[in-house]
Image (cartoon, helix red, strand yellow):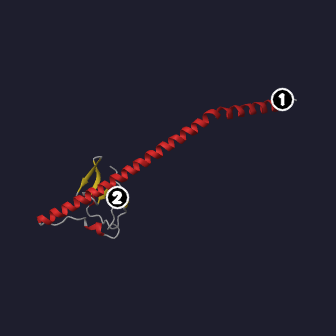
Amino acid sequence: MKKLMIYAAVAVFSVATMSEASAQGRGRGHNRDKGRKEYVKFHEKRHKAAYKRDKEIAKSYREYYKERDKAYREHIKHSNKRYRDHDRWYYDRRFHRRSEYVYFPAYRTYYDPYRRGYVYLHNSRWVFAPTMPSFMVGVNLGTVNVQFMANLPM
C-alpha cells in the first residue's frame, strides 16, 4: 500500500510539474517569435541596403577611375612621357582582364587595378602605395595564392 501511495504521489507531482512548465511559455513564446521575425526582417532589409550601397560605391569608383585614366592618357600623350600601366605580373593569365581587386592573403595586401597600386596594413592603418611594398619584393606572384574581391576592406 505504501508503494502504491508513493507511485501515485510521484505521478501526480510529475504531471503537475510538466503542466506548469508547459503553461509558462505559452503567452510569451508567441511574442518572442514575432519579435524574432521582426528582427530578422529588419536586418535583412538593412543588409540589402548596405549591399546595394556598396555596389553603387564600387560602380562610382570604377567610373571615376575610368575617367581619370582617360585624362591621364591624354596628359601622357601631350607631354611625351611613358604611360604607366599595371605591373608586369598583372598580365599573367590569372590576372589579365580582371576588374576585381587582387588580394594576397599571405601578405595581407591588395592590388588596386583602378589606382594601379597596393593597399596594405602599416602600423594598424591601411596605406596606399603606387609601388610594391618592400616585404613583397622578390616574391613570384605568379605562384602565390590569390583571391579576387569586389571591394576593399576600408
What residue is at 40 percent from the left and 47 percent from the top?
Answer: 50
Q: In the rendering, at what x and y percent does residue 149 appear?
A: 37, 58
The quarter holding residue 105 reads bottom left
In the displayed orientation, state which residue is furthest to the bottom: 93
Residue shown at 85% from the left, 29% from the top = 2
Q: Secondary structure at mark 2?
A: strand
Could you classify mark 1 by the number of other residues whose Cα lies within 10 Å: few (under 14), some (14-19), or many (20 or more)?
few
Q: Position of residue 25 (x, y in %)?
A: 64, 34
Q: Please state the horizontal and vertical placement of residue 143, each as a whole percent of the image.
A: 35, 67
- Please determine whether, in this image, residue 99 is positioned above or below residue 120: below
Asked whether, in this view, residue 83 is left or right of residue 11, the answer is: left
Q: Is residue 152 visible?
A: no
Residue in front for this viewpoint, 81 or 59: 59
Identify the residue at horizontal 63%, vertical 33% (top origin). Answer: 27
Graded by Cα atoms within 10 Å as few (under 14), some (14 to 19) or many (20 or more), the crowding at tag 2 reads many
Give the residue displayed 11% in from the left and 64% down from the top: 79
Return the residue at label 2.
103
How many numbered discs sit on the rendered protein? 2
First reached walking from the N terminus: tag 1 or tag 2: 1
Could you say which quadrant of the image residue 90 lies in?
bottom left
Report the residue marked by disc 1. 5
